[in-house]
Image (tube, grey):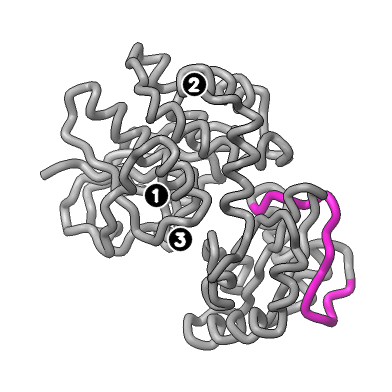
């Protein structure tokens, strides 16, 4: 049975492309490994897959008991494929805070960089494994996506240097390709309010409160905000049917580097304390905020500890 390399539910470009990249690394070293996904491919990710003529990873809803699995771009079981608790977890490659207790030692590689693909890329080079042009292009796409073409505060010099090297291998102009890819994924297109409300979503626990935090990055926030009332209804339904206390949607303006944070549920005081703004409505404008990992989740975690 092949080893599975898989990212988180509601996968973003990093989750998909790092799974493909790490599976390629394992295969090059003689291991039987295959990339999988446990969610739909976004328009942005599909653009990258189409550009480099690579098929999307196989979709699976659940892993079997004892299945050997590598987790990429996440380390929390609530974000992972169903069945992960009974799988034979082989390793984790990630760039998020660690929140995992394991029953036995395993391979874990985490770094404080802007993208898991940065880690996967350097693992190829450190281990002397030649990288295919297509793999380089996909890993580059992930870095562009996660760092918003280096605008995110999570971006490091290592991300930038890695991206430059990947662009050379992939044979693309870094900035030109990056802008086209971001544009391809920036519109809402035919997405329903429910799909937008759950786009690139991750569950979190802030103190005693369960929350889901989604993000959609756009060139024109007005396109999403025109659907605000319908989005709020979809977010309320998520809280009601999936047991969340709070549903948050980050509408991130790529060009102006800001976020309109839509929210429903309680306690709104958590938001007010985290961001120092009144939270008596349903939307909060956050200039300079583009990163969920660095500018939303830590602030909410800290505020919850004081409630």
Q: Residue at x 46, y 30 (%)?
A: 137
Query: Residue 9 falls in which quadrant of the image?
Result: bottom left
Q: Which residues are magenta?
A: 278-292
Q: Which residue is mark 3?
A: 10
Is residue 306 visible in the rendered image? The answer is no
Disc 1 from disc 3: Cα separation = 9 Å
Where residue 133 sits: x, y (%)?
A: 39, 23
Image depth: mark 2 or mark 1 in front: 2
**Residue carrying label 2:** 171
The quarter in which the N terminus is drawn is top left
Mark 2 and mark 1 lie on one chain; the one further toward the N terminus is: 1
Instruction: Provide residue 154's location: percent of width, then percent of height.
Output: 67, 39
Residue annotated with mark 1: 7
Quadrant including the C terminus: bottom right
Residue situated in front as seen by the camera: 286 or 218 = 218
Q: CA distance from mark 2 to mark 3?
A: 29 Å
Q: Nearer the viewer, residue 9 or 175?
A: 175
- Residue 172 located left or right of residue 21: right
Q: Residues within 10 Å of mark 1 (few under 14, many from 20)?
A: many
Mark 3 Cα within 10 Å, few/some/many (few <14, many 20+)? many
């Amino acid at each position: 049975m092949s080893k599975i390399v898989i990212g988180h539910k509601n996968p973003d470009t990093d989750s998909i492309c790092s799974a493909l990249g790490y599976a390629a690394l394992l295969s090059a070293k003689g291991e039987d490994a295959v990339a999988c996904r446990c969610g739909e491919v976004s328009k942005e990710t599909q653009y990258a897959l189409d550009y480099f003529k690579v098929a999307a990873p196989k979709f699976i809803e659940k892993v079997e008991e004892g299945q050997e699995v590598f987790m990429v771009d996440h380390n929390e079981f609530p974000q992972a494929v169903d069945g992960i608790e009974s799988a034979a977890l082989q390793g984790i490659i990630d760039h998020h805070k660690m929140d995992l207790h394991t029953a036995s030692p395993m391979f874990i590689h985490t770094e404080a960089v802007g993208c898991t693909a940065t880690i996967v890329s350097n693992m190829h080079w450190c281990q002397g494994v030649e990288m295919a042009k297509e793999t380089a292009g996909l890993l580059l796409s992930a870095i562009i996506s996660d760092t918003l073409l280096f605008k995110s505060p999570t971006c490091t010099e290592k991300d930038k240097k890695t991206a430059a090297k990947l662009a050379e291998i992939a044979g693309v102009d870094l900035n030109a390709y990056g802008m086209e890819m971001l544009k391809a994924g920036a519109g809402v297109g035919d997405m329903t309010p429910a799909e937008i409300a759950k786009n690139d979503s991750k569950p979190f626990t802030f103190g005693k409160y369960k929350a889901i935090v989604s993000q959609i990055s756009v060139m024109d926030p007005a396109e999403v905000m025109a659907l605000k009332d319908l989005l709020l209804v979809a977010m309320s339904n998520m809280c009601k049917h999936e047991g969340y206390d709070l549903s948050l949607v980050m509408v991130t303006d790529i060009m102006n580097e800001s976020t309109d944070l839509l929210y429903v549920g309680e306690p709104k005081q958590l938001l007010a304390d985290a961001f120092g703004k009144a939270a008596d409505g349903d939307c909060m404008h956050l200039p300079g905020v583009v990163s969920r990992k660095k500018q939303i989740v830590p602030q909410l975690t800290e505020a919850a500890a004081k409630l």
